[in-house]
Amino acid sequence: MLYSETSLFARLKAACADDWRAYVGHAFVKRLADGTLPEACFRHYLGQDYLFLIHLARAYALGAYKSDTLADMREAAAMLSAIVDVEMGLHVKFCAGWGLTEASMAALPEAPETLAYTRYVLERGTSGDILDLQVALAPCVIGYAEIGANLEADADTRIEGNPYGEWIEMYAGEAYQELARGEAARLDRLALARAGIGAGEEADGEGRFANLAATFRQATVLETAFWDMGLAAG
């Protein structure tokens, strides 16, 4: 299981349930599952996702700067290293199978949807604290694990013979699921330390949770727009 029902992530999801369902159950995701997504849509998504990963790395670098404990700094630095030293290489290798080179992806202009979400995440981290930043990242980092797990568990999902089967297996796989579990646990630790939010309770009243929920909702809506962008490319 990625997170407990009393975790901050579960409570944030519940606070924007309709938006969350629109994100994880998007037509782009469903067409990945049954293999009917036009290849042009997927290639466009992959190119923009490469640019997104660069800003994701920047976000974790910002997280290290925003950390006020060595433990938090190490966690942010580890994620930054994982993206820059591992994930980018894996993404480039995966994209090569779709006829995309790193040089061609690096030269792409950022789509408005890519700009919107990545800059929103960085703005929340810059104007807020590390908890605000992690909440803005959560629909992406933890959400992809939930999408992968949902697709793997769905009897209607086609893996064998599906051109997108490898993508599904990547996010449903134990390596990514473990990363997401770690991020959900980190979110709970930061919530307790920064806002007194723990064990399903809000020790300092509704104010901070309401603000975090608004951030999570906006990030979820922007993630949905990212799927819209991919689907519109077909």
Image: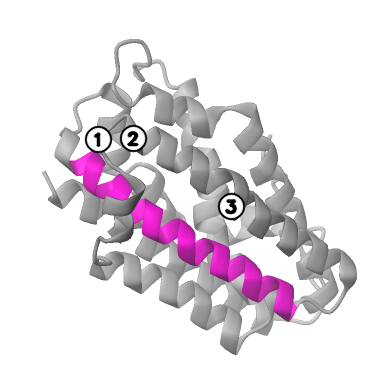
Decide which of tag 2 and tag 3 comes sooner along the chain: 3
**Horizontal placement of 45 versus 133: left or right?**
left
Question: Considering depth in this image, is 46 or 35 the residue closer to the camera?
Answer: 46
Mark 2, residues whose alpha carbon is within 10 Å: few (<14), some, or many (≥20)?
Answer: few
Q: Main secondary structure of the magenta part?
A: helix
Report which residue position mark 1 lands on.
99
- Where 21 sits versus 106, above or below? above
Report which residue position mark 3 lands on.
83
Mark 3, residues whose alpha carbon is within 10 Å: few (<14), some, or many (≥20)?
Answer: many
Q: Which numbered mark, 2 or 3, is in the foreground of this view?
A: 2
Q: Amino acid at mark 3?
A: Ile
Residue placed furthest toward the left: 234
**Horizontal placement of 34 versus 51: left or right?**
left
Q: How is the image coloured?
A: one colour
Quarter of the image with the N terminus in it: top right
Question: Considering depth in this image, is 206 or 119 the residue closer to the camera?
Answer: 119
Q: Are dots 1 and 3 in contact, CB under 8 Å?
A: no
Magenta part of the chain: 41-66
Decide which of tag 1 and tag 3 comes sooner along the chain: 3
Q: Position of residue 216 (x, y in %)?
A: 52, 67
Tell me the tag on residue 225: none
**Horizontal placement of 6 versus 228: left or right?**
right
Residue under the image location 58 percent in, 27 percent down: 173
Residue placed furthest toward the bottom: 127
- Where 194 sits versus 88, above or below? below
Tell me the tag on residue 96: 2
